[in-house]
Image (cartoon, helix red, strand yellow):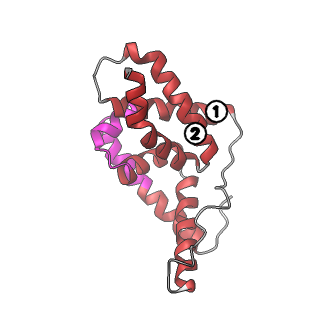
């Protein structure tokens, strides 16, 4: 198996998941995942092991995503089919709807964050990366990442609470 095939097999799901969480669109995430691995394939000869392969790939994915945003109008709305409650799995439909609404608000608040804030929260909380790894992805020091994460969490809480209170933030 070639190096790029192994790289793709080992990291495709994580890169896709990251890009999906950044953009909220499955088709866009798939397209950007392919672009990420294309760019990784082209620049693999330039990888010198200064960071882990996963960190290097997430850095490429971050630049692919932000490059996409620069070239396309921003659609700040998540797909409508997200977080529909599965009434068959829960005993209480009211609780299921409340949980679904909280997930929708959480996703909307996350999606409204600036890209760097969103990336730091996703990489730290969902992908469970260290501050050093996130710093390598975003080309920032670990201490700067800690500050960004603190500010991102504050902004996230503010947005979530405003959304929960029914304030329109467009």
**As rendered, which of 64 and 74 lies closer to the eye?**
64
What distance separates the C-alpha of mark 1 from that of mark 2? 18 Å
Q: Quadrant of the C terminus?
A: bottom right
Q: Is residue 149 left or right of residue 34?
A: left
Residue 113 position, x and y percent, is: 54, 52
Q: Is residue 102 above or below residue 42?
A: below
Label 1 sits on residue: 70
**As rendered, which of 31 and 169 lies closer to the eye?**
31
Q: Earlier in the sequence, mark 1 or mark 2?
A: 2
For label 1, count other residues whose C-alpha is less than 10 Å away and answer few (under 14), some (14-19) or many (20+): few
- Extent of the magenta region: 127-152
- Which disc, if any, is residue 100? none
**As rendered, which of 106 and 13 lies closer to the eye?**
13
For label 2, count other residues whose C-alpha is less than 10 Å away and answer few (under 14), some (14-19) or many (20+): some
Q: Is residue 165 visible?
A: yes
Q: Nearer the viewer, mark 1 or mark 2?
A: 2
Extreme residue in the top direction: 45
- Which disc, if any, is residue 30? 2
Q: Is residue 97 magenta?
A: no
């Amino acid at each position: 198996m070639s190096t790029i095939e192994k790289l793709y097999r080992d990291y495709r799901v994580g890169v896709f998941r990251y890009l999906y969480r950044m953009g909220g669109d499955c088709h866009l995430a798939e397209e950007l995942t392919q672009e990420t691995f294309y760019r990784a394939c082209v620049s693999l000869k330039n990888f010198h092991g200064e960071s882990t392969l996963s960190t290097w790939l997430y850095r490429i994915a971050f630049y692919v995503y932000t490059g996409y945003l620069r070239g396309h109008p921003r659609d700040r709305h998540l797909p409508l089919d997200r977080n529909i409650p599965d009434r068959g799995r829960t005993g209480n439909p009211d609780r299921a709807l409340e949980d679904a609404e909280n997930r929708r608000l959480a996703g909307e608040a996350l999606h409204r964050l600036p890209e760097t804030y969103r990336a730091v929260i996703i990489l730290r909380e969902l992908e469970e990366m260290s501050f050093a790894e996130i710093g390598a992805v975003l080309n920032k020091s670990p201490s700067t990442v800690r500050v960004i994460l603190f500010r991102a969490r504050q902004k996230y809480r503010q947005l979530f609470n405003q959304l929960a209170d029914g304030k329109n933030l467009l």
